[in-house]
Amino acid sequence: MRRSMSAFLCPFALLSLLTLRTFCAGADEADVKIEVVSKPLECAQKSKKGDLMNVHYDGFLLDGTQFFCSRSDKKGHPVWMVVGVGQVIRGLDAGMLDMCVGEKRKITVPPELAFGTNGKGPVPPNATVIFEVEALAVSRGPRSMEAFSDMDQNKDRKLTKDEVKST
Ligand SMILES: *[C@@H]1O[C@H](CO)[C@@H](O)[C@H](O)[C@H]1NC(C)=O
């Protein structure tokens, strides 16, 4: 019934609308899948947009290949980052919000919100990626990206412990 109605009304308009949606809408933050692996009983403060987070994270492809491990990168130091401001891929910006200190998550990110049609380094084009993230610390972040880049003394867009301490 509905079908014949719309077919009667304007089949081509409907078709082009659907096509537009498919091509333009792409993926959005709702397509990021978050699974909580473990969560502490106490959770005084959850991460919010703009917070400074200290995390360990491992990146995997769908076939299980590991392409990143913060525990073996840069002498195994956990990574400082500001969440929700475009410092990391969109999927992680969205997937790391509302996280407790001590929480572990598995975050599955479609390519549109990860490394896209080109991929990056070991991540092939159009790859869905999975991150296992452990939040070690959450603190109210620098108020703006300018403040962040002031703190980021060596301008590698990552904050080391020393850079955080010295401000
Ligand atoms: C990746 O996806 C885009 C858009 O769907 C497509 O044009 C491109 O050919 C794909 N690349 C590979 C290597 O599959």
Image: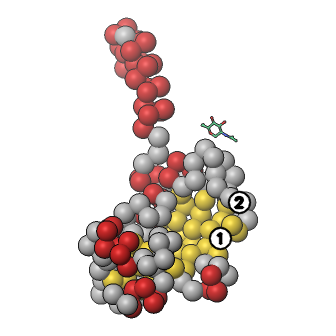
Tell me what residue is drawn at x 43 percent, y 79 percent. Answer: 153
Q: Report the front residue among 59 and 44.
A: 59
Question: Is the Cβ of the residue at disc 2 closer than 8 Å to that at disc 1?
Answer: yes
Establish if 152 lies above or below 92.
below
Tell me which amino acid carries mark 2: Pro
Question: Which of these two is toward me, 42 or 162?
Answer: 162
- Type of residue at label 1? Phe
- Residue 12's disc is none
* Figure check: 62 above or below 54: above
Residue at the spot of label 1: 68
Q: Provide the residue designation for mark 2.
A: 122
Residue 76, x across and y down, in percent: 62, 86
Q: Nearer the viewer, residue 56 or 154?
A: 154
Residue lying at 32% horizontally and 77% vertically, measured from the top left: 141
Which residue in the rendered view is the most extreme toward the left?
143
Q: The residue tagged with tag 1: helix, strand or loop?
A: strand
Label 2 residue SS: loop
**Residue 70 x, y percent position in the rendering:** 61, 78
Q: Is 124 placed left or right of 143 in the picture? A: right
